[in-house]
Image: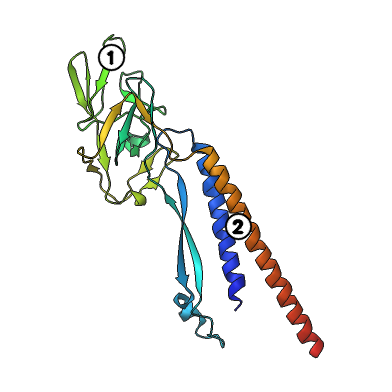
């Protein structure tokens, strides 16, 4: 078993996954509250495959390590950007807004771009109603009094309370399932009320994506260089093996 060849091939696969993640990040870098895709790296021991390799005559290389890769979501906070729009809100700290998606599925988002829909419900750009702790939030677009939203997420208009935003968190956000650029599904996790001593709602702000096109392009160039380097290693190993085979055939 040629360890170097396998390690280079695994590294190339990881770089391809990283290129895919970067492409997704670039396409969504302008989405408020977007959380970038990262590629996590870990090393797995070849000894994990010992059962499959027990029949091999040469077991001397079972101790070598191979890279393993998986896509992860980076939940680092983005920059809060003032918009002066009273229905724009950002979460400062851990947490997510809850919205009602298609077929009554609940999605979770950091994108606080909310506007009244045709029924007067605060909703996302896609038309998903924003959820309060007791249901939806209905405002009166014809009312000249602005909507106000407190740091605790209490929504009111003209002195009338309209509900408190449902701001939630999860025990392990990394296990949330990405539904699209700005939305996550809970999967098998249960949403919990966010700790409002460490998390606050900021009216008139939006959270920017936690990446920029410039950062992603820089990472893309680095990833391409790594891919090319591992490609050269594989070519060198292939040439080396070809020479060995040729030498062995000449001996016969």
Left or right, 29 with reference to 165: right
Residue 238: x %, y % from top left: 70, 71
Nearer the observer, disc 2 or disc 1?
2
Disc 2 is placed on an element classified as: helix
- Image disc number at residue 115: none
Quadrant of the rendering where the N terminus is positioned: bottom right
Left or right, 136 with reference to 11: left
Q: Residues within 10 Å of mark 2 (few under 14, many from 20)?
A: some
- Image disc number at residue 146: 1
For this rendering, which residue is in front, 245 or 52? 245
Q: Earlier in the sequence, mark 2 or mark 1?
A: 1
Quadrant of the rendering where the C terminus is positioned: bottom right
Look at 56% across and 65% down and name the residue there.
10
Separation of marks 2 and 1 at Cα, in angstroms: 53 Å
The type of colouring in the image is: rainbow
* Above or below 147: residue 71: below
Disc 1 is placed on an element classified as: loop
User: To which residue does mark 2 refer?
Assistant: 226
Look at 43% across and 52% down and name the residue there.
72
Left or right, 154 with reference to 121: left
């Amino acid at each position: 078993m040629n360890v170097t060849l396998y390690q280079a091939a695994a590294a190339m696969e990881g770089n391809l996954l990283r290129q895919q993640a970067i492409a997704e990040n670039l396409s969504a870098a302008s989405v408020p509250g977007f959380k970038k895709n990262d590629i996590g790296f870990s090393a797995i021991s070849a000894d994990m495959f010992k059962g499959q390799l027990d029949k091999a005559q040469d077991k001397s290389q079972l101790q070598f390590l191979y890279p393993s890769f998986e896509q992860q979501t980076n939940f680092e906070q983005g920059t809060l950007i003032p918009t002066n729009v009273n229905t724009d809100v950002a979460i400062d700290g851990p947490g997510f807004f809850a919205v009602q998606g298609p077929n009554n599925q609940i999605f979770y988002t950091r994108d606080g771009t909310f506007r009244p829909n045709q029924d007067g419900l605060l909703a996302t750009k896609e038309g998903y109603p924003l959820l309060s702790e007791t249901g939806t939030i209905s405002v009166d677009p014809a009312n000249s009094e602005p909507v106000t939203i407190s740091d605790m997420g209490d929504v009111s208009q003209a002195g009338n309370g309209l509900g408190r935003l449902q701001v939630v968190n999860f025990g392990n956000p990394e296990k949330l399932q990405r539904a699209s650029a700005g939305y996550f599904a809970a999967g098998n996790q249960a949403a919990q009320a966010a700790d409002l001593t460490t998390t606050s709602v900021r009216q008139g702000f939006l959270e920017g994506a936690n990446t920029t096109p410039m950062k992603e392009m820089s990472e893309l160039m680095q990833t391409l260089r790594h891919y090319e380097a591992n490609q050269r290693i594989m070519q060198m190993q292939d040439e080396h093996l070809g020479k060995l085979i040729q030498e062995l055939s000449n001996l016969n």
